[in-house]
Image (cartoon, grey):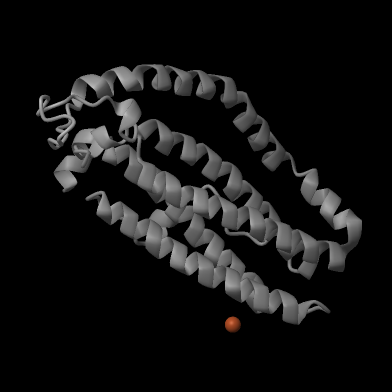
Amino acid sequence: MIDLIETIMDTNAAAASLGRVLADSYVLMLKTQNVHWHVVGGAFVGVHTLTEQQYNDLFMAVDEIAERIRALGKVAPGTMAEYLQLARLSEGLGGTDDASMIRGLVEAHSTMSDLLRKEIDIMDDLDDYGSEDLFVQRLRVHEKTAWMLRSILEQIGGGKAVAQVKADAPVATKVEAVKEDKPEKKAKKKEKKVKAPVAVEAAVPVKVPATPKVAAKKEETVTASNNGGGRRKLFGVKADG
Ligand SMILES: [Fe+2]
């Protein structure tokens, strides 16, 4: 099975992408736990409870990401030294007061979302739809988490704290970088779409079982357009008719 996967995509590149997200997720999990331990103010119960849910979600996520790497036949990074080397997120809390710590988490989840958009593009180019789907799920979680934490920040720190997060330069720069990539990405996808039907028609002759109506034609070549699209070619699946 692993051999089959390796023939249809670059599993080394996919595992590297998964490893980077695994490392960032691990750092963010610890960072979240650190806030969970050190929050003290009026929003203690809410923040303490929410951050517990968040680090539990990240704990499940790192497990799933690491197991995806194993499913691709590669070795998953599994030490703190490797995580700190691979991670793009920093461990620091950005301050010891509640507003600074929560702002640090909002920034981390926003940065994580930006990084995931990049990694999703990479997985899309690699045709690794399984990993891409996992990253899209994680993107939704990080966007939702940033929104929830931003709401708490609004409650405890007022508009000033939220404005500081919105004006954060590194995150804004990353968003611009993502936008700049769009024209090139669109052109690539367009090129892919144009090429795909031709390749599939040539590669997938599919047998259709004989019926009274088609008895004279025992075998018929069915094009991809009426049989479910191009991904079937990746797995060598035959249509049932
Ligand atoms: Fe706890």
Say whether residue 74 is left or right of residue 229: left
Q: Quadrant of residue 211?
A: top left
Q: Residue furthest right?
A: 159
Q: Is residue 107 left or right of residue 53?
A: right
Dividing the image into 4 quarters, which one contains the C terminus?
A: top left
Residue at position x 48%, y 40% in the image: 120
Q: Position of residue 69 (x, y in %)?
A: 31, 52
Q: In the image, is residue 228 above or below residue 31?
A: above
Above or below, comparing residue 19 to residue 33 in the picture = above
**What's the residue at 52%, 37% (across, down)?**
118
Please tell me which residue lies in front, 88 or 68: 68
Ligand 1 position by quadrant: bottom right
Between 82 and 56, the residue placed more toward the observer is 56
Q: Position of residue 225 (x, y in %)?
A: 34, 26
Q: Determine whether 47 is above or below 66 in the image.
A: below
Of residues 207 and 1, the one drawn nearer to the viewer in this rendering: 207
Q: Nearer the viewer, residue 51 or 196?
A: 196
Say whether residue 77 is visible: no
Residue 73 at x, y percent in the picture: 22, 50
217 relative to 22, above or below: above
Q: Residue at x 40, y 31 (%)?
A: 125
Q: Residue 19 location in percent, x, y?
A: 39, 50
Left or right: residue 95 versus residue 67 is: right
